[in-house]
Amino acid sequence: MFGRAKQKSSKTTQSATANNRRLHSIAGLLKERAFAGGFDVAGSSYKFNYEPSRAAVAGRRLELTGRLTVTDARGQARLKEGVRATLLSTQGGIGAAPVRRQVMVGGVAASAVATSGRQQQLAGGAAGVETKKTDEQSKTKPLPEVDSTGSLSFCGVIYFQFEPLDGRTLGVAADLSRLQLNARLAPTDDTGRALHGIYCTVVDALYGKEVNEPLATASISELNKLLAEK
């Protein structure tokens, strides 16, 4: 009787410890259409694969929905379908920018749309009018368009927040209710490169000072086409 009570108490303690252990984030790489990586919890190693199948805009943020698979050290895989992940923030990349897929907005390629400042310069030149800059205009002029600013910049890392997950369902002895995915975008395959470019375009449309709704709609549509391709 005493032995059973002691065993029960031990299991309760282990369960409580697992519930108090929280996994805050996991890191992965974009490979093909999925984000893949690994993590350690309480001395146990796991591999994971998150493969989005659908993209949408939810509250001015990119939301992905797809399958999350977690594989333990013994090779046992557990998965959950329809897992939502919301893009919270991004980090700029360093090096060569990805080639961006042409996104048509109102019949015009998005990459061909000039910035407002450049449009004004082109309009002035086309009209043969010499524009004079006042001191005030000089102070408020936009930053120069170099490879790390504006539409020529790109994402090197994107940070997603998963919906609340049940660690027991995925075979992980930890609280996964606030799990974040830190995904590095440095693909070495053609599918990954195409997705890298379109993810950057989505970020341009949704996460700037103002939401570019036409570009967001068009880029989300292109993203869904890429996610559906097999």
Image (spheres, rainbow, N blue to C red):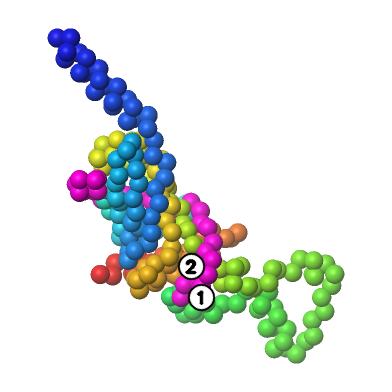
Q: SS class of the residue under badge 1?
A: helix
Q: Mark 1–mark 2 contact, CB under 8 Å? A: yes
Q: Is residue 80 magenta?
A: yes
The secondary structure type at the circle numbered 2 is: helix
Q: Is residue 214 visible?
A: no
Q: Which residues are magenta?
A: 71-99
Specify the farthest residue to the top.
2
Q: Is residue 121 left or right of residue 204?
A: right
Q: Which residue is mark 2?
A: 201
Counting from the top left corner in percent of width and height, residue 23 is at 39, 39
Above or below for 55 versus 214: above
Residue 219 sits in which quadrant?
bottom left
Asked where in the image residue 12 lies, by quadrant, the reply is top left
* Kind of residue indicated by mark 1: Ala
Identified by mark 2, the residue type is Thr
* Count of residue discs: 2
Judging depth in this view, the residue of 107 and 115 nearest the camera is: 115
Classed neighbour count for the residue bearing mark 2: other residues with Cα under 10 Å, few (<14), some (14–19), many (≥20): many
Give the labeled residue for mark 1: 110
As for residue 48 lying within the magenta part, the answer is no
Residue 208, image x and y in percent?
57, 60
Where is the N terminus found, in terms of image quarters? Answer: top left
Q: Residue at x 43, y 75 (%)?
A: 101
In the rendered structure, which disc, 1 or 2, sits on the residue that comes first in sequence? 1
Image position, residue 60 (x, y; %): 49, 55
- Name the image quarter holding the C terminus: bottom left
Q: Main secondary structure of the magenta part?
A: strand
